[in-house]
Image: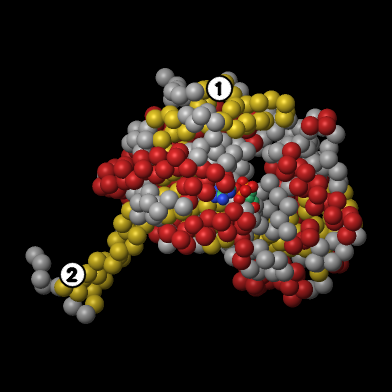
Amino acid sequence: MSPFVGGNRVDVGGVSVSTDHYIGGERVASPFTFEDRSPLDWSVLLADVSRGDAQTAHLAVQAAHDAFPAWAALGAAGRAEIMHRLADLIDEHVPSLAAVECLDMAMLEESLRLRVLARGARNFRAYADLARDYEERVWSSNGTANRVIRMPAGPTAVITPWNAPFMLSTWKCAPALAAGNTVVLKPAEWSPLSCSLLADLAHAAGVPAGVFNVVQGIGEEVGAALVHDPRLTRISFTGSPETARHIGVAAAKNIVPFTAELGGKGPFVVFADCNLEAAARKAAGQFDDSGQVCLAGTRLLVEARVRDEFLRMFHSFADQHVLGDSREAATTISPMIHPDHVASVAGFVDRARAHGDTILRGGTRSPLGGADGLWYEPTLIEPASNDSEVVQSEIFGPVLTFQTFTDEADAIRLANSTAYGLSAIVYTGSQPRAERMGRAVRAGTVWTNCFLVRDLTAPFGGCGISGIGREGGDYALDFYSDLKMFQVLEGTTA
Ligand code: NAD
């Protein structure tokens, strides 16, 4: 039997998707809706989705609040059983999830099927097991037996962005649920549909009513109401620094811990001693997903003496990109998410031109899809100076900058010259240099001669305006728990 049943539904790519919220184990509709269109063809209205408000947020937090004691009391092993069932259901329904997410946010369908969605299932399995297998820290001192125990914290708000919405939501919901918290998830309004399917799968897996809730709507409306609710005990946010500032105010008001995984402006540093061809290939790969990747290395910093050779190789790899429909296997560059976002990216490039930066390739909208098409040509810009807006601000589109450096100290200076610090990529053939760069570059993650490989137990987060806190592995479980120091005077209990 299909798990995709109940509430108001529309057909999206052959999959039945609820346009309602999911609160307290039931589908709940709002009187107002917002339009959700497909970036693959903007004339296609995928769904009119329930537009939540303060009352919706209140109901969802109430449901999470009511469900919390029983979910917490179930214990990590009991929760793990249910979460494993959910992971199995995700794996089983990858084709449906991929079809919907591809239409909704235009990520390449093949990449969704083969990599991204399976990560969602792995998140549930990995955190369920980590929480279940947690070994308490135990020691004896000053005549007392000491233990550090993790207590479930309570209702948790999870707010996610429009890129990779399913995977990024599971990245946060899985540790929160495994830790014994209940969750209200607010997906982004530009790609709300796959998280609605996640609610169906959670329901089918037997996640108890109220433990996992999804509210749909506009960030400034239902999102803002949600994060201000004083019954929340954690807020976990991924999105832009601008929104994080608003959420931080709400978190401060209620004294609620929050993590913020924010934008990036990663340096992609290429030393002359590296495998230049591998570096150039990977650099051209930063256009993947139309550059709508927070972790992308968008500032190419190349040692001056290999400038021409690197650029020649880079262009030849970039020439191989195929802009097209994300459902077709040959496509490597998908359309961008929304007309407003294309306009924002085009604005950056236009201002760069006016500022005297040099456009080395691209710099225009693609004619694909006609006037309403959302493809932007892969673009490389050589800035007139390091102060250029395209160097200093996150663009979140298929736009990279190109600069050269003279030596290692110069590379570090440029790499660390923005307010961001999410990730960095370094290509070098020297182990001592790799070690020095890994320590000197200010970023939450530094990849050396590789990109986007990550162990789920590793810490993840950003420095500077790229974020607050770390998630991943035990770091996430600690965040979603109240760590308790539990002491007993030795010899007083038997
Ligand atoms: P955004 O900040 O505009 O929105 C993110 C979410 O916040 C959405 O669900 C939105 O509805 C909600 N929101 C907006 N205003 C709100 C408010 N006042 N109160 C509560 N919620 C509110 O970000 P976006 O445009 O959806 O995503 C792109 C950004 O996300 C980029 O900066 C990108 O780098 C970043 N990002 C970071 C990571 C990471 O792991 N560090 C991953 C993916 C995306």
**Residue drawn at the location 73% of the way across and 73% of the way down:** 413
Q: Give the secondary structure at mark 1.
A: strand
Q: Is residue 179 above or below residue 369?
A: below
Name the residue located 47 percent from the left edge and 29 percent from the top edge. Answer: 29
Task: From the viewer's perspective, tell me whether residue 148 is left or right of residue 317.
Answer: left
Amino acid carrying mark 2 in the image: Val
Q: Does 332 appear above or below 181?
A: above
Depth order, front residue of 188/307? 188
Image quadrant where one finds the N terminus: top left
Q: Tell me: residue 400, above or below residue 54.
A: below
Ligand 1 within 8 Å of the CB at mark 2: no
Task: Evaluate if marks 1 and 2 touch, with contact meaning CB atoms under 8 Å apart.
Answer: no
Q: Which residue is disc 1 drawn over?
A: 10
Q: Nearer the viewer, residue 45 or 436?
A: 45
Asked whether, in this view, residue 243 is left or right of residue 381, the answer is left
Tell which of 34 and 237 is nearer to you: 34
Q: Which mark is residue 488?
A: 2
Q: Residue at x 62, y 31 (%)?
A: 35
Query: Can you give x and y, in whole percent of width and height, for residue 384 in the image?
Result: 87, 64
Left/right placement of residue 238 relative to residue 203 reads right
Mark 1 vs mark 2, foreground winner is: 1
Q: Which three-letter amino acid code belongs to the residue tagged 1? A: Val
Secondary structure state at the residue bearing disc 2? strand
Q: Would residue 286 be visible to someone looking at this image?
A: yes
